Amino acid sequence: MKILIAHGSSDATHAKQVRMLAESVSNLIGEEVRAAFLSDERLPAGSVVLPLFLGAGKHLSEDVPALVAASGATLLPSLNEYAEQLVTMACNQLTRESTRIHALFAIYRYSGFEPLVAAIHSANSRCSLVATASLHSEPSLTSVLNRWQSDGVGPITVQPMLLFGGHTLGRLQAMIEDASATDVLLAPVLSECDGFAALIAGCLQAQS
């Protein structure tokens, strides 16, 4: 059995999205795939676990490994090791109609998300303008939007480098509203991008 483990609990805002992803991935690989959460006391024994985390931190270094070990399960590399593939997928979605866009990639924070930031900057030729901004560190999303507005940059497409919707996406939306920029388009979170379920399926199958 394959497990997709996310932060939070089964009652979290994003829980339904995680379950829908597990169902889609299960259909793609022809195996049972279940959703799990950090609040779970145990995972199915003998299961193979893919952590749905984009950054390094306590959850990934301590909480997930402890839960997996206590459950007698096998831990796979987290999604932060697939940063290039995730950024490529997001860029493909953003540039579907044109590469002449000003893309601002919103990350959770810079510390612990270095592979993701590096992958974004490596893709800077995919759009007319590419930059990163943070939700919990500097430069913040609001400050970069304000600077681009003062420089006459627009329209601006903000790509949330978030796996699912929820409270963090709400914070991102509030930061956009607080900015002076008026011509801002919010792109979908990563799990809503075409090819995301296939990417997750590939992560599971690569370690089979």
Image (tube, rainbow, N blue to C red):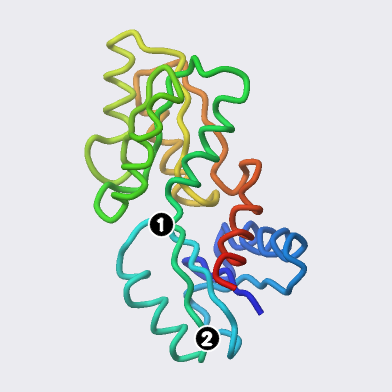
Quarter of the image where the N terminus is located: bottom right
Name the residue type under label 1. Asn
Instruction: Name the disc covering residue 154, or none.
Output: none
Q: Quadrant of residue 152?
A: top left
Helix, strand or loop at mark 2: loop
Q: Is residue 21 left or right of residue 109?
A: right
Q: Is residue 22 left or right of residue 113?
A: right
Q: Which residue is denoted by mark 1 in the rendering?
A: 80
x, y (%) of residue 136? 29, 46
Q: Quadrant of residue 182?
A: top left
Vertical placement of 129 versus 35: above or below?
above
Vertical placement of 113 versus 40: above or below?
above
Q: How many numbered callouts?
A: 2
Vertical placement of 31 versus 71: above or below?
above
Helix, strand or loop at mark 1: helix
Quarter of the image where the C terminus is located: bottom right
The residue carrying pointer 2 sits among few (fewer than 14), some (14 to 19) or many (20 or more) residues within 10 Å by Cα, namely many
Nearer to the camera, 117 or 63 = 117
Q: Which residue is denoted by mark 2 in the rendering?
A: 73
